[in-house]
Image: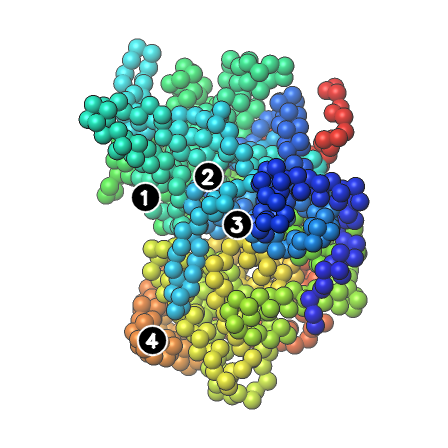
Amino acid sequence: MSVQSDADKRKQISVRGIAQVENVANVKKSFNRHLHYTLVKDRNVSTVRDYFFALAHTVKDHLVSRWIRTQQHYYEKDPKRVYYLSLEFYMGRTLTNTTVNLGIQSACDEAMYQLGLDIEELEEMEEDAGLGNGGLGRLAACFLDSMATLGLAAYGYGIRYEYGIFAQRIRNGEQLEEPDDWLRFGNPWEKARPEFTLPVNFYGHVEETPEGKKWVNTQVVFALPYDNPIPGYKNNVVNTMRLWSAKSPQDFDLRFFNDGDYIQAVLDRNLAENISRVLYPNDNFFEGKELRLKQEYFMVAATLQDIVRRFKSSKFGSREAVRTSLDSFPEKVAIQLNDTHPSLAIPELMRILVDIEGLSWEKAWDITTRTCAYTNHTVLPEALERWPVSMLNSILPRHLQIIYEINHRHLENVAKRFPGDSDRLRRMSMVEEEGEKRVNMAYLAIVGSHAVNGVAQIHSDILKRDLFHDFYEMNPEKFLNKTNGITPRRWLLLCNSALADVIAERIGEDWISHLDQLVQLKPLAEDPAFQRAVQTVKQENKMKVAQYLQKEYGVNVNPASLFDIQVKRIHEYKRQLMNALHIITLYNRIKANPRAPIVPRTIMIGGKAAPGYHMAKKIIKLICSVGQVINSDPIVGDKLKVIYLENYRVTLAEKIIPAADLSEQISTAGTEASGTGNMKFMLNGALTIGTLDGANVEMAEEMGMENIFIFGMKENEVEDLKKRGYNAFDYYNANAELKQVIDQIASGFFSPNNPDEFRDIYNNLMYHDRFFCLADYDDYIAAQEKVNEAYKDQSVWMKMCIHNIASSGKFSSDRTIAEYAREIWGVEPSWEKLPAPHEPVEESK
């Protein structure tokens, strides 16, 4: 079956809307103008990249007037502003998302078609903005989309990394990292704002003066802001993501001139500018490097200066600083800390209020705690930030003093509440005294915030029961749950427009900004015509991916096979290894009985490993080696194919997820805080095989256990196993099939040229597996057999798919953000449209 032709695509009346003749003419005119005047190119010598930039500038024109008007609206109305502070924003591409949210996608498509250009070819020229590692950074991007769609006066603040997450290349089954020079051709969406450049201080020392403490003799680095527009969905709201770039100060040390080493002085400017050079590529792992601490403080210090400046000047009627009192700060400012990475915002805000604004400690602390809120993203001990006191003392001496004072007062409060409990004081101190003295940044974030949330119900419960139990006992009212969500604009409308059309034909288009309306599809789950429509879309998406795999990997896959996909960062707790055990089991079964009927599968695994994570890299090598054996075995044929997806990123997710039949969400119960990939697969009509972990628990609640393949130990059973003591050999010796798989890995069956290649994996599985792969193996294999049975009856399978889609309303980031807004930030979402640029602004009432 052929993929739709361009002409067919253009004929469709879909959620993209009908291209208005006038709009198409305007887009063409603007496009040609930008090609000529902005890019200084003639049509005869223009490249595809030139066409992309011309189109991007054309689309940006539609953004800018709305952007200016939105910011003017905020200035005049002076609403409470929300500041989302994150070291990561994993944005992906911007072009299509912008045309979708502005409602000009069909006009742009038609205009390019009329100019003889292929819009998909242009879209492929855009680099992903890969300023994040995985879930945490992509969540921030979805949240920005939802905050704009809900009309919140919100700002994302982060770092403009020159190099984002590395590009992954797989060579001989091994991961190689290439730098991601994403800015080499320029970024058409950003606007540098040198007039808002701010100084950030490091090092120096603290002096006692009659006016209080002064931080002096510091080294200064400048923070240069770049603004990126964030459009809401068809509401004419355009918010701002402001990313800071490090700049060396102009007036470098004049002593160099006396030494005559002027050249070296100029070259040394690089040292300061290294702060925003590169994203640290660790996911769920703390690397206590000085440069990382500097990045965290750099972002926080520049952002807080900006927030205070805007607070002081943002009062209707005057551009001068009009607010002299900071009393109303928490009524006008909400700061959300995305994990502990920006938790230095707490001592920095205290420094500003006490040292610079001259407030009393008590008043400053009241303002700080009522302003800040903290989101926790992980319970893994190796991921928690614990900065050495010696490093803080060197780089941020005043902040260390402030942290000590916060801790001292905090422990006084603990002692009042729990007299005589000295062990509790030790447990709850922000300063850890065992070994090298360290500051526990999560404890600082909890004490300095009025709200602390986990990102799925099970995760929030674990925080209260376990990780932060003492703090929960002290302040139970602080602890909340805010289950993560995803934006349905990017993760359905944009990446799977054919499915969006099928849905819109049945229930209209309101679901795009009110995803709970998908529940209206439930009665259609057993409707044969609707089942056929959804199945046709899935099959077309699988055909496209099959073509992509043939082109990129030279592997012919059977598009009728079950597409079984696990895409996420490679980590032991996510148990890609257990997936590999299942793959080898399937292979052994085919080899043992080649004639047995089988549900054919194409298994895709993708994701990056942190460059220094040895075990994760070995797991990639194992999967690739197993794939090589399987894919070249003629007895297996097209019953089973295994593909490692290179360089998994936002843009690849948009291609792969709509084609999935089965989504693998198989982390050990109690380890995955939420997961958001799980929601993307669900929304796009894949079924989930998963443990009762993270948001899988709530997904199962929404859709019913009959529409999901749940297996494995529950979180309390994992805890019981830990207490009893886990011995992998108990499982290895009890199951001949499992024993064979483990022996093949250990003996070099998949690495004949190097029999010891996977010895580390064997040792890990058998002697120090913190995540109990073997304990869940039996149940996992049984669940996979249930998957096969369901897939054989396509009517049953499609019914389950439709129940998944219809139950995914809860997992919109719009719902998540509405909860943050009402319950943490104290602002009310609004679905009202702002007037379009050509419409008059309503007079203020």
Three-letter amino acid code at the position of disc 4: Ala
Which of the labelled discs sits on residue 160, or is there none?
Answer: 2
For disc 4, the marked residue is: 746
Q: CA distance from mark 4 to mark 2?
A: 45 Å
> Disc 4, disc 2: CB below 8 Å?
no
Three-letter amino acid code at the position of disc 1: Gly
Q: Is residue 837 shown left or right of residue 383?
A: right
**Nearer to us: label 4 or label 2:** 2
Query: Earlier along the polypeptide chain: callout 3 or callout 4?
Result: 3
Three-letter amino acid code at the position of disc 2: Arg
Q: Are there few (<14), some (14-19), or many (20+) residues within 10 Å of tag 1?
A: few
For disc 1, the marked residue is: 288
Q: CA distance from mark 4 to mark 1?
A: 34 Å
> Disc 1, disc 3: CB below 8 Å?
no
Residue 538 in view of the camera: yes
Residue drawn 61% across the image and 45% down it: 42
- Residue 389 vs residue 504, the one in the foreground: 504
Quadrant position of the C terminus in the picture: top right
